[in-house]
Amino acid sequence: MESTNVGLRVSNAEREPVIERLQEAYAEGRLEHSEFDMRMHLAMTAKTRGELDGVLYDLGPGPATPVLPGDSPWHGPEPSGEDRMLAAVAHAIGYPTSFVGPLVLMLVSGKRSEYVRRHAREALNFQLTVLLITIVTFGVGAMLFAVTWLVAGVAAIVALTGSSFRYPWILRLVK
């Protein structure tokens, strides 16, 4: 964001990359938990670009993601209807197949579409996290399945809109 525009009001779409950068910095160990919470709150409540810029002032540049005119919110070319449908299926197929369905979609359809690959990879990591929690807690974690169905349903709907979706609080085992 340019320093000449510090007084301009920000939109939710402008907050999302800042929030993602904060999450990456926290995962890298650059932020302590309390500082991460504070910065997340500041990013969510920022009204101007200057306030939003201040949240990332000492973190340095994040991974470069080129944004071209006409790009969708996921920072890539506009996904086709088929890509959107397959991305939604990647999230929904986890209900009956656990991690197998998202894995197959990632390996088969992910070769021709980065959009499908990203959603399938996210769904795969989500299903693996739920499976690991269930195994580690000797089945007690299976009570999470009702909640996971809701979250995966939301992810499928977001995929249909052509947007990016990241599950909160999961292990990202597959990159």
Image (cartoon, grey):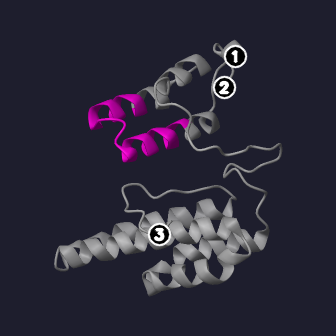
Disc 1 residue type (three-letter): Asn
User: Is mark 2 in CB contact (under 8 Å) with mark 1?
Assistant: yes
**Residue 126 lies in the magenta stretch:** no
Q: Residues within 10 Å of mark 1 (few under 14, many from 20)?
A: few
What mark, if any, has residue 174 been given in the picture? 3
Q: Which residue is mark 2?
A: 1
Residue drawn at x 63%, y 34% is 14
Which residue carries the number 1 mark? Answer: 5
Quarter of the view holding residue 90? bottom right
Q: Position of residue 108 (x, y in %)?
A: 65, 84
Task: Classify the position of the N terminus by image quarter.
Answer: top right
Q: Between residue 85 and residue 169, name the one nearer to us.
A: 169
Check residue 26 for magenta coloring: yes
Number of the front mark, 3 or 1: 3
Looking at the image, can residue 27 be seen? yes
- Relative placement, left or right, of 100 versus 81 is left
Q: Secondary structure at mark 3?
A: loop
Q: Nearer the viewer, residue 169 or 152?
A: 169
Amino acid type at mark 2 = Met
User: Residues in magenta?
Assistant: 18-40
The kind of residue tagged 3 is Val
Going from N to C along the chain, the mark reached first, 3 or 1, is 1
Q: Residue at x 58, y 40 (%)?
A: 17
Q: Is residue 41 depicted above or below 28 in this figure?
A: above
Q: Are marks 3 and 1 in contact (CB under 8 Å)?
A: no
Residue 77: name its quadrant.
bottom right
Decide whether the magenta segment is chiefly helix, strand or loop.
Answer: helix
Q: How far, Cα to Cα, is label 3 from label 2?
A: 31 Å
